[in-house]
Image (cartoon, rainbow, N blue to C red):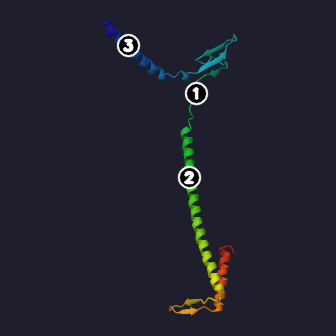
Amino acid sequence: MTVESRLRFLHRSRGALFAACAVALLFANPAAAALYKWTDANGRVVYSDQPPAGNEKYEIVGGAAPPSNPNAVKDLAAKEAEFRKRQTDAAKAEKKSDAERVKQAKLNEMCERARANVRTLAAEQVALVRHNEKGEAVPVDDATRRRERVEVEAWIKANCGG
């Protein structure tokens, strides 16, 4: 084997070794191990990866991150259900509001027609006729005109606010 081929082999081996180390470092989790701190009987501060024996008080320093919320899935599902309920309620309220607007528009139109009818009934110079069951035009007398006007005004007062 020549010197040049040996150098190429070492260079490739070093690259493979570097890649293996990088992968190992990626998967190593040094923060997962807890570090315990306590003061021993002689007053010395002790750090260890094992908790002290006995009933000595200790604290965890730079330990692992706290475990994830075990109820996270349930919490998320509850929040999602709550969000969907708010969306459904909002859609129902919008639909109800639209129905109310349509109902109010129809009522406004009916009120306007009734007011126009009252104006027509009040205009005595305008001759009114009704058609009977035979289709013949029959003039409306003053008493009928006054009675219909009172009825329409009462309907307006009851349904149109005045």
- The amino acid type, in three-letter code, at marker 3 is His
At a point 53% along the width and 39% down the height, the residue shown is 73
At a point 49% along the width and 21% down the height, the residue shown is 28
User: Is 4 displayed left or right of 112 in the figure?
Assistant: left
View extreme (left): residue: 1
Q: Nearer the viewer, mark 2 or mark 3?
A: 3
Q: Residues within 10 Å of mark 1 (few under 14, many from 20)?
A: few
Lower sequence index among marks 3 and 1: 3
User: Is 77 displayed left or right of 147 in the figure?
Assistant: left
Judging by the rendered image, the residue that carries numbered circle 1 is: 65
CA separation, marks 1 and 2?
A: 36 Å
Q: Position of residue 114 (x, y in %)?
A: 62, 78
Secondary structure, mark 1, is loop
User: Is 59 displayed left or right of 92 in the figure?
Assistant: right
Lower sequence index among marks 1 and 2: 1
Q: Nearer the viewer, mark 3 or mark 1?
A: 3
- The amino acid type, in three-letter code, at marker 1 is Ala
Q: For the C terminus, which image quadrant?
A: bottom right
Judging by the rendered image, the residue that carries numbered circle 2 is: 87
Lower sequence index among marks 2 and 3: 3
Q: In the rendered view, tell whether residue 99 sits above or below residue 80.
A: below
Q: For the N terminus, which image quadrant?
A: top left
Secondary structure, mark 2, is helix
Judging by the rendered image, the residue that carries numbered circle 3 is: 11
At a point 64% along the width and 18% down the height, the residue shown is 37
CA separation, marks 2 and 3?
A: 63 Å
- The amino acid type, in three-letter code, at marker 2 is Gln
Q: Quadrant of residue 5?
A: top left
Q: Quadrant of residue 97?
A: bottom right
Q: In the rendered view, tell whether residue 113 sits above or below residue 61.
A: below
Do the CB atoms of the residues marked 1 and 2 lie less than 8 Å apart? no
